[in-house]
Image (spheres, grey):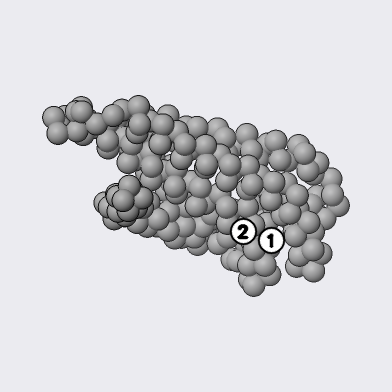
Amino acid sequence: MLQKKSSFRSKIQVSEYSSIYMFMFILFIVGIVFGAVIVNSMSFIQKQDLYFYLHQFFGHVQEGTLLTGVDLFQESFFYHFKYISLIFILGLSIIGIPLIWIFIFMKGIVIGFSVGFLVNQVGWQGLMLATASIAPQNIFIIPGYLIAGSFAMIFSLFLIKKLFSSRVYKLPMKKHFVQYGTIFLVVLGVALVAAVVEAFVSPHAMRLVVGWTL
């Protein structure tokens, strides 16, 4: 009976917050589209300058002169840890919601610009490069960021309701905070997996593709 009640309660929570999950996803997609539009608005000289540095980067990838796998893993995980922690802190503040929106939107812009620029410069070969260099780790980290942003927004809204509504005044704060922290620990676990993929899978995939695309 208790299991039925808990499962029913979880279904209610999912349906209750489905609009927030969808909003975060749409915000991220809009960011991707906006990033792709930025590529098309760049001048020819700007594209050529950026492509020059990008070509140098892939040259270093092919030569294997970039960071070692361990160094790249540490750098990648620290980067994700820093921004996931920032989202977590923003969720604890009532005024953090707009900043969470901006952050998710900017993540979409970065992905859209990166993929859009590669495709714009080298066509389908750029798509192959994006698949090898960008897609592997982002398969894991993008859902992680969307989940983090959604639950940060949910928790921030809970704090607002608790502050201004007497109906939620008696809701156990500790329970919600533990659930909130647990979600972010799971997201950090996802970030750890993404960092491993970025450090030990993506470089090998890029070397396989770079040799016959650039």
| Residue extending furthest toward the front | 1
Where residue 132 is drawn, which disc sits there? 1
Q: Are marks 2 and 1 in contact (CB under 8 Å)?
A: yes
Above or below, comparing residue 22 to residue 174 in the picture: below
Q: Judge whether residue 169 can be spotted in this image.
A: yes
Image coordinates of residue 76 in percent, x first then y, are 65, 40
Three-letter code for the amino acid on which mark 2 is drawn? Ala
Q: Is residue 204 left or right of residue 4?
A: right
Residue drawn at x 13%, y 29% is: 166
| Residue extending furthest toward the bottom | 124
Image coordinates of residue 179 in percent, x first then y, are 40, 36
Q: Judge whether residue 122 can be spotted in this image.
A: no
Residue drawn at x 56%, y 49% is: 141
Label 1 crowding class (10 Å Cα cut-off): few <14, some 14-19, many 20+?
Answer: many
Mark 2 lies on residue: 135
Q: Name the foreground residue: 173 vs 145.
A: 173
Q: Is residue 22 left or right of residue 50?
A: left
Where residue 205 is drawn, which disc sits there? none
Q: Name the foreground residue: 104 vs 119.
A: 104
Three-letter code for the amino acid on which mark 1 is drawn? Ala
Q: Name the foreground residue: 22 vs 33.
A: 22
Q: Is residue 10 left or right of residue 63?
A: left
Label 2 crowding class (10 Å Cα cut-off): few <14, some 14-19, many 20+?
Answer: some
Cα gap from disc 2 to disc 1, whole angstroms: 6 Å
Above or below, comparing residue 152 to residue 57 in the picture: above
